[in-house]
Amino acid sequence: MRFKIGGSLKKRWLWAVIVLCAAALAGIYYCKERQNTGGTCIKVDVSVRSIDYRGGKASEKMLKESLALGTEFLVNNQLPEGNFNYSYNWVDDRMDADDNEVRQAGALWGLTLIYQYRPSEKLLNHIRKSLDFFNRNSFSSGDARFIKYGNSATGRTGTVALVALAHIDLLRSDLRSLSSAEKRLYEKYMNEYVNFLVKARTSEGLWHQSYNSTSGKAFGKNSSYFDGESLLALVKAARYGGRTDLKEIILNSADAGFRTNIERALKEDEDSPITKGYYQWSSMAFYEIGETGWKGSEKYRACVIDLAYWMINVHRTLSRNGNTAYAYEGIIHAWRAARDLGDMRAENYFRNVIDAGLHKLTTWQVGHSAANSYIRKHTIKRSIATGGVQNHRSRPDLRIDVTQHQMHAVVLALKYVYARQLGEMSGSGHR
């Protein structure tokens, strides 16, 4: 039996082919247009895909509630010494005995970013306490400073990078209640941590992932996470901490990081875990480099946009089961870059992804009015759970780094994407 296509069906097929061809041509034109203006960084799928909004969209109100709760979680989980509870199972009421020094430093940095957006004396006191913890457990070697966390004989370069970032972002905030002596001390530590990062670079311009906790001598292969964290610390030190001497080091390390952690990594695996580790850190660092106006810095803004397409279309952040708040630290910077460059196609696409993604992740926050059914059916046994963000929609472990990354994404979203008037765009204390 032969199937005969009727006239109306033929027309529908013809229109479908026309639409598909038009979409393909539009994509080709978009790619060529970006290439002609020097606006490409990597070969990546730049198609705009439909977004599933059945779960809902984020809003300013939702995110402000989330930030208040997340801040409460971080400060309530600070220990008397100044570091934090690492992970807490809020359903079983069980504290995890594990720890991670890099994520501890990240929690400190997260508090400084929240303070930069919404300063308060209470939050500043928690930041001081954590800064004192890390500075008390630091040692100097000449003009460089490194951290010894606990009894570990080996330090992690990412720890130093994040503590340096905490100093940098605190010092660019509203510090009217800090004494001149405190500011000078924090500036001294900032510069010494940055000096350590300069000395911890590999011959290729990346970063050794480890160092001896006694001597401070760096060793070992690079880590894409630490490469990105260290690069971000250096470029922020240059832009906001007066370290203009770092310019050539920053550009060389940015080029080395791109070649190793993006270009080479994606050639070997189109969804490379190396690029995933580098993603949000490099996006933030590349955006900052693009803002410097240095010769050769323009290409990095285009990289932020291409990397966001990679995160959305290849790594598929919206469909992942684990918490991907880290992705929005990068995607929001890509939204800003697209807006700066007048790329409305990318700007609108990234905005739609941010709307859907942050809504989804906010429903994983304990105590939020939009919390999902798994969270709502369980009772909060201790107040330290309130505001914590799960790493999965139905797994009750609350890690400090998961909440920290999500609160940073929320701060960025409130400061830029959901700001209702131009006066809010810069955020409190931002410069």
Image (cartoon, helix red, strand yellow):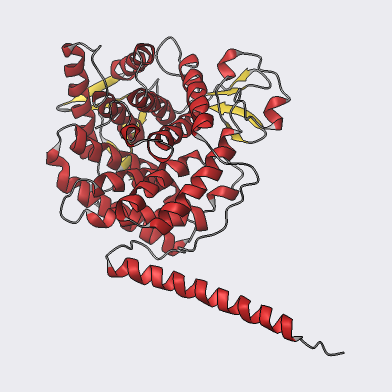
> Split into 4 quadrants, where in the image is the N terminus?
bottom right
Residue 86: where, in percent of width, then height? Answer: 50, 23
Q: Is residue 330 left or right of residue 235?
A: right
Q: Is residue 110 left or right of residue 230?
A: right
Residue 323: where, in percent of width, then height? Answer: 55, 39
Residue at 39% in and 68% down? 30
Residue at 39% in and 23% down? 111
Q: Is residue 243 left or right of residue 197?
A: left
- Res. 199 in view: no
Q: Is residue 284 above or below residue 272?
A: above
Residue 269: where, in percent of width, then height? Answer: 48, 61
Q: Is residue 247 above or below residue 422?
A: below
Residue at 46% in and 21% down? 71
Residue 307: where, in percent of width, then height? Answer: 40, 54
- Furthest residue to the left? 245
- Res. 78 in view: yes
Q: Out of 181 and 45, give the one closest to the viewer.
A: 45
> Split into 4 quadrants, where in the image is the C terminus?
top left
Q: Is residue 236 above or below residue 23?
A: above
- Furthest residue to the right? 1
Q: Out of 260 and 321, give the one closest to the viewer.
A: 321
Residue at 46% in and 50% down? 350
Q: Quadrant of residue 89?
A: top right
How many discs appear? 0
